[in-house]
Amino acid sequence: MSGSTNLPTIRSRELGQGLRAAIRGAGLGVRELAHKLGWTHPFVSHVLNGKRSFSDEDLLSLLLVCGVDRDERARLLTLSRESGVRGWLQHYPSGTPEQPSTLIEHEDKATDIVDVQWAVLPKLLHTEGYARALLSQGTSASGAVEALVEARLGRQAVFTRSPPPRTVFFVHEPAIRASIGGVDVMCDQVHHLLKMSIRRNLELRIIPSSAGHAAQAGSFALMESTEFGPVVYLEGAVSVAFLEEPDQITAYRRVLSALDKSALNGTESQELTTVLAGELSRRASPEMSPMDP
């Protein structure tokens, strides 16, 4: 065995996740695996938690015992070699997946999530109709759209976790007023925002149209957990970026501090959302019966 103890990075946590999946796939327990390899149980636990690296030879031994295929072995070897590198830019030539595994892992473990959105509403707050309307703009294959909708809504399971994360959503006012999918879709969506905004661990903060100058920072999410340091998530059409360098985190905290001053507070945001929900209800189809907040 070799290696050194380090603070976990995104890559080292991803490596640990991949190794846990390999061990489960082989039907082994951590203690049983450690015994087979002649390692100590604490050593294996530290590796799985992203707190320790080890040599290519040790990693290959583990992967071969678990019967991992060649492609996955290559991926995990690369992660191991880069485990000390902070930050991660992930490319997806065919388009960013609806559920990037690294993002889902961080959302599942986050104690605090702050999401800032300027053009559209936060994905964690989408209704089925709103998500379908947005996703239909990118593909004409109905089967593909439905799979994407299901994946997007699946991320909302984070709210039913016990305990759920503390979440703050900063949303630019034009994003709530936009007509995505038509009046009925937006009516349902805005009522859903209102219902979610009264949850104890969730706060909706609307950024007035007049504060649009702050949009130069772009959309992003800041996630924090007791298991890892703060991470900023950025999403593009064919790539996503995870930032974790201290100076990067500080820069985005400054953006949040500025938004906290310019955005409506929680009560004011609820009041504006109530007004918009009422306006949409009067314009929506008679058969629409939005949920009461």
Image (tube, rainbow, N blue to C red):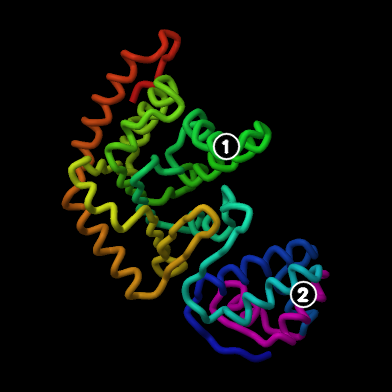
Identify the disc placed on residue 63: 2
Q: Residues within 10 Å of mark 1 (few under 14, many from 20)?
A: many
For residue 173, above or below residue 164: above
Q: Looking at the picture, tell me which residue is in the foreground, 82 or 60.
A: 82
Q: Residues within 10 Å of mark 2 (few under 14, many from 20)?
A: many
* Residue drawn at the location 62% of the way across and 82% of the way down: 81
**Disc 1 residue type?**
Val
* Residue drawn at the location 68% of the way across and 73% of the way down: 76
Q: Is residue 168 left or right of residue 261?
A: right
Q: Position of residue 11 (x, y in %)?
A: 56, 72
Using the rendered view, name the quadrant where residue 36 is placed: bottom right
In this rendering, which labeled residue sits more in front, label 1 or label 2?
A: 1
Q: Is residue 56 magenta?
A: yes
Using the rendered view, name the quadrant where residue 264 is placed: top left
Find disc 1 in the rendering and name its residue: 149
Magenta region, mostly helix, strand or loop? Answer: helix
Residue at mark 1 to residue at mark 2: CA–CA distance: 35 Å
